[in-house]
Amino acid sequence: MLYYLQDVIDGVLMGSIYGLLALGLTLIFGVLKVINFAHGSFLMLGMYVAYWTVSLTGLHPYLSLILVVPAMFLFGYGFQKALVQPIFKAESDVREPITVIIVTTGVWYILDNLALLLFGPDYRALTPNPLKGKMLELGEIFISLPKLYGCISALVTAGALTWFLRATRTGRAIRAVSLDREAASLMGISQWRIFAVAMGIGTSIAGISGVALTPFYNVYPTVGVPFDVKCFVIVVLGGLGSIPGAMLGGVIIGLVESLGPVFMTATWTEAIVYGLFLLFLFVKPSGLFGVKYDW
Amino acid sequence: MREGMFKSILGAALAIGLVASSLIPGAAFAADKVVKVGNLLPLSGPSASVGLQGKQAREMAVEEINAAGGIKSLGGAKMELLFADTKSDPNVGVTETERFINTEKVHVITGAWNSSVTYPTTAVAERYGVPYLVEVSVRDTITERGFKYVFRIAAKDSWWTRDQFAFLKDMEKEFGVKLATVAFVYENGDWGTGFAAQWKKLAEQAGLKVVLDEPYPSTATDLTPVVNKIRRANPDILLLTSNAADAILLTNSLAEYKVRPKAIIGSGGGHADPTFISGTGQNARFVFDIVEWETDVNKPGAKETNEKYKKLFGYNMTGEAVDAYVAMYALADALERAASTDPKKLRDAMAATKLSKGPASIIAYDSIEFDESGQNKNAALSIVQINDLGKGLERVTVWPKAARRAGYTPVFPMPQK
Amino acid sequence: MTPSRFKKILLILAVVLAFGLPLVLRSPTYLHILIMLFLFAYMTTTWNLVGGFAGVLPLGHSVFVGIGAYTSTMLWLQWGISPWIGMIVGGLIAAAVGTLIGLPTLKMRGAYFALATMAFVEGIRVMVENIDKLGPFVLNGPRGLNIPPLPEGSLAAFQFASKEPYYYIILIMLLLVVGLTWRISRSKMGYLLMAGGEEPDAAQALGVNVTRYKVMAMALSSFLTALAGTFIAQLTLFIYPKSVLTLDLSFELAFIALIGGRGSIAGPILGALLLRPVSEFSRIYLSATLPGLHLIILGAILILVMLYQPRGLQEPITRFFDRLAARFGNGNGGTEEKA
């Protein structure tokens, strides 16, 4: 029994970090109705920023957030303004231009390979890393401290984002735009500014995930790729555009990954993840919390 | 709509013309002064890190060879290295091999690290009758197809697994520790599943009980579940086949969850990667790994060569780097004896190789000699233990006993605290 | 000479040139590059039946390539059934699978369809990697399947000692599929698909069951794409999950189509003609010194084309040829005859 408890704890911790990353993706989707294929690369970028900040200044990994969050926000904002917005403007009649998906894919290729060119293929471990390998031991149960920090960051971020969307002016504008662009612009909300802000926030959430991962995960140029596909699964599971859905979807995937190997090999667990995804797609495409859109 | 089809084909014709005209090879070089060596390596993608090491080791060797006067029997001809990125993709590898042979007119090919790339590319070289020197790829069947132009320096994978079990048997005897159970954990690729199949047979022969046989996806983002499984299976021996990222993840999680089998044994690859120790730190302590070569090998010149390499590229030579380095000297030796770049003559010279002198003698065994199948019959393996002897973590040779570092006693079984 | 006759002459010239090329170009390397080029033009054209005409973004077409490659190879290795027959069997299986994926997902728009096709190919890849034996068939999991080479070659075994037969096979396949696309685009199905792709709501409102046509297009596209899988298996004689069942391949097809111009007949071919050489040569000449640079270039091309020519490069090129044809055609550069 204790075994299952251990697996459940591991699954929830890791799953909430997946959920954190998916949060950024789902926000961007909710507002722009576009899947950002470069989201994994944004995570990689965030991890490198955190890595370099810590190794150059010797700060505590979580203190690198002061740099990572604004830097990633500006990056996302600029990305939207320079690359995505022109396409939206050119294809204003199309609701979800496929060309945007391709542009984000182009950005993914460029960022990953730029990292390879600049930093080489090395697997970098964070140093100094006061959280490295720290475990809370409760009898037979082990809880990874860096993952616990990651889980807390995920909850705090999700809470802060929910509050921001409900209580602030900009947040409400974001929600208005994601519900109905035309109506929002009639109410005097500039959708272009909102798009860029949403992309900035989504990107900085990828950065926060990067900070949460670096204390127990190595940084390398293609680190975002395996997370990327997982994130797509999570957002569909939770319902594209839904914040609680992303968190819950993340935890479900985390649990499948941690409990699955009890009954089968880890390679089959991977197949279960995709199977679950397809099942949802066919049976309940709006996901756990999704709004019923017109797809 | 008719124009649509028409235009497409018109476009096709024009582009073909364009491609064709750009492809007509320039005037043939005065080829008698250079020996062209085509090298296939994974320079981008997930194996880029090992590909880069292979490239650097080759460049260092060829620079030395050329500086020392090139191939003297060919009038001081210089060796020229050409590199092609296979991206670890067999199809790209095949395309590049054909380009090397038909367009670049290389005299010899080396590569390709990934067994899955080496296997089909050697077949291409054999078909064209171009000598192909495999420095690392371990899949057995590469040299078991009756090919005439393919030679391999590294040991094949059945030798790697055989020696892992021989090592365990010797340790049992030396330390009087009984080993009863074994767990296999391996990446779910060509390499990992190949090793695991042989482990299964060997474990049966050795009378060991297999308590866990667990492949995992090499792109896994979290290996904690696998570590929990190992923890539950509680094996005496843990055998691993991992690439760099997963070797680091596994080693760290094993230490965090205090999973301490009597012996953890890696299979090179990720465990031999220069970033493995920096990525794991003290967690890698007492882990065993099987290698072809180690910096503490007791051979003349080994230390100096490694120093030079480390100064140039920033990390120690790995077995794979040494194989690549030595491959260049083995080629130079064969060229010297063939006194020709004719593929047939070069092939015969390679088959007659018996190299035990010069910089190539940094290898851990006596000499490079190829058997009928093209396999280097002397290639041998040793086992190292990662330990901290007061100067930071290092890899210490422990097996075979004759090669063990003087004054070192292996830590076995792994301490429980 | 009218513009359309001028174009017809050029068209015939182009086909003749393509057929005559191996007589001049003897190097197997260049023939191989051309074979790969035609192969990608072929796969992208079949992709285009769904991705272009049906107005959705399939990102998992390699699953059909994999089905084709694995089916014909397994039938050949296990029972000695000629890959030519295996090719058709693989196509039929792929068509069934394509229908199965299409039925629920083609009702949904955009993002969901793209993600579903992606997940499908990943799921199938993972399954194949986990299966060593499937009934009587050996799958060999991640290690893949080798087709023992026949040094002499044999038409029945779909193996040839030289590159020329492969060149002609894929060239003919390409011409047939282009012809087929052209016929479809002029048929009722083609009009409905394109109408449905651009204005799904309007088409639906007119009582046209667009989804049905989309599923039909998907089945046809899956069938034709699978044929390319068999061709790849016979060309390389070695297939494994990470070579034929990958997202990389699926994405590449989408990139080629989008850069060339999806939804047009010329687009996929132009895309392959432009992108394949660029990626081949940049990999050959750049990757040894600056690893990854060739992919940066690919990414940059993608972005630039999407920003400045969102309908793909076929548009300006088509315009250029129209002008050319008009000038050479009847001298007054004006009235163009619609065929």
Image (spheres, coloured by chain):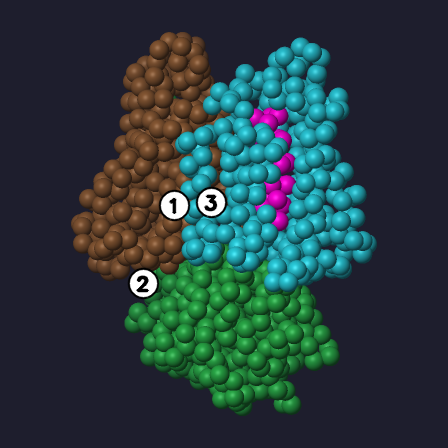
Chain colours: A cyan, B green, C brown
Q: CA distance from mark 3 to mark 1?
A: 12 Å
Question: Do marks 3 and 1 share a chain?
Answer: no
Residue B219 rendering spot, x and y as whole percentages: 51, 53
Q: How many marks?
A: 3
Q: Which residues are magenta?
A: A13-37
Residue A24 rendering spot, x and y as whole percentages: 63, 36
The residue singled out by tag 1 in the image is C124
- What's the mark number on residue A129? none
Chain ID of residue with mark 2: B
x 39%, y 80%: residue: B206
Chain ID of residue with mark 1: C
x 51%, y 65%: residue: B232
Residue A241 vs residue B403, the one in the foreground: A241
Circle 2 crowding by C-alpha within 10 Å: few under 14, some 14–19, many from 20:
some
Residue B349 rendering spot, x and y as whole percentages: 40, 79
x 38%, y 45%: residue: C124
x 35%, y 69%: residue: B141
Circle 1 crowding by C-alpha within 10 Å: few under 14, some 14–19, many from 20:
many
**Amino acid at dot 2:** Arg
Give SS at disc 3.
helix
Q: Quadrant of the N terminus of chain C?
A: top left
Is A19 inside the magenta-drawn segment? yes
Chain ID of residue with mark 3: A
Question: Do marks 2 and 1 share a chain?
Answer: no
The residue singled out by tag 2 in the image is B127
**Amino acid at dot 1:** Ile
